[in-house]
Amino acid sequence: MIIDRYLVREVLKPLGVVSGILIAIFVAYTSSRLLTDAVEGVLPTHTVLALVGLRTVIALEVLLPTTLFLSVVWGLSRLHTDYEMIALAASGVHPARIVRTVGGLAVVAAVIVAGLSLYVRPALYGMTYWLRAQATMDADVRRIEAGRFYAGQRGGHVVFAERYDQEHDEMENVFVHSEQNGVVRVIHAQRATQRFEPNGAQVLVAFDGYSYRLGMGEGQDRIVGFRQAEVLLNTETLTPEYRRKAATTRKLARSGDRMDRAELQVRATLPVGTLLLVLLGVPLSRAAPRSGRGARFAVAVLAYAAYYNLRMVAKTLVDKGTVGTFPGVMWVELLLALVVAVVLWRMLRGNRWTSL
């Protein structure tokens, strides 16, 4: 048990560093993309922070197996380069014991990834889509950057303000375009402000302008001047569209759609891929004493990149109908299982399993 705990500790020590680096990179990348929407007034700041948090948790299903795989390679390669593996072998520790200890970590990681992939990820994707739709519907037009056009949900309204007077909380030289049932309405006002009703409705109050109604061939076009006019901005109903990433695993299992089946296979095979990847890290960590660990780590990175890209290619082939739902995307895990079996057999052959 002392040896097992020591091996686990050596693997988990770099896990915190590697996972911290990858999570920081992911958060920075996601934030940079979403903050652009916040600056342009498309998303409020609190929604951006919520989306970054949700996407980070969603990414854990990929980050966890990646970091554990790289940590196994990094931690065990140090034992090889510092002669500790030789010392363990001289003490009667069978290589299969190393595999068994790392395999225990792999099983725990696979169970966590299964929960994330099958249940947590679709729920969080649903929350992500809902937040985006809600933010788009409820966008405060006063956050729009002056001199830029803002399109509401599904292009329901287009709002433009040449200037924004922060002192009086008013927009100046305002243009509003809307279209409904083939009728185009354009409002041009000198000033405008926004009012929120108790029921959550958002109303744009325009002052001193003209309203243009264009019937698009009906012959009922008209122009009306006004001192004050009101435009209801969030007239759309929030009806979330079907997104297979947000669909429950049970719903995907009952679906006969080819792309739904591909999504289900991606979720189901990810825990298997996690288990196989972590086990692959054991033979990939073998290095000559006093040699650098960088070469082994680089090989591990390339191996993971090849596996990840193959998964993406397999899913694309199924989505396009080039490959049927069987084998679907499962052939990638089958290929990985074959590679793991071969390299483990080569590492363990000639050793007595009875010495465990």
Image (cartoon, rainbow, N blue to C red):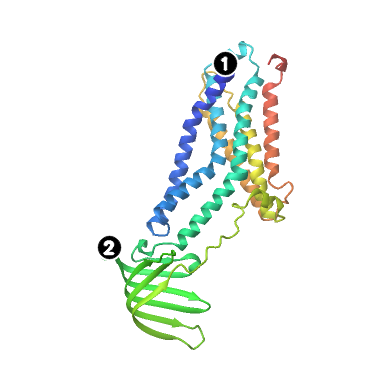
**144 and 348: which is toward the camera:** 144
Q: Position of residue 73 (x, y in %)?
A: 56, 28
> Which badge, 2 or 1, is on the more N-terminal residue?
1
Which quarter shows the N terminus?
A: top right
Q: Which type of secondary structure does the marked residue at label 2 adopt?
A: loop
Residue 84 screen position, x and y as percent: 55, 16
Q: Along the line of sight, which residue is nearer the eye, 240 or 60?
A: 240
Q: Which residue is found at the position 47% from the left and 63% from the top?
A: 137
**Would residue 121 be seen by someone viewing this image from the given angle?**
yes
Q: Which residue is mark 2?
A: 166
| Amino acid type indicated by mark 1 | Ile
Q: Secondary structure at mark 1?
A: helix
**Residue most toward the bottom?**
219
Q: Residue lying furthest top in this view?
A: 91
Report which quarter residue 38 is drawn in.
bottom left
Which residue shows up at 50% across the image and 76% down it?
180
Residue 159: which quarter of the image? Answer: bottom left
What is the spatial separation of the Cα atoms under label 2 and label 1, in whole angstroms?
67 Å
Q: Quadrant of residue 135?
A: bottom left
Instruction: Give the amino acid type for the residue marked by disc 2 in the picture.
Output: Gln
- Residue that carries the numbered disc 1 in the rendered image: 2
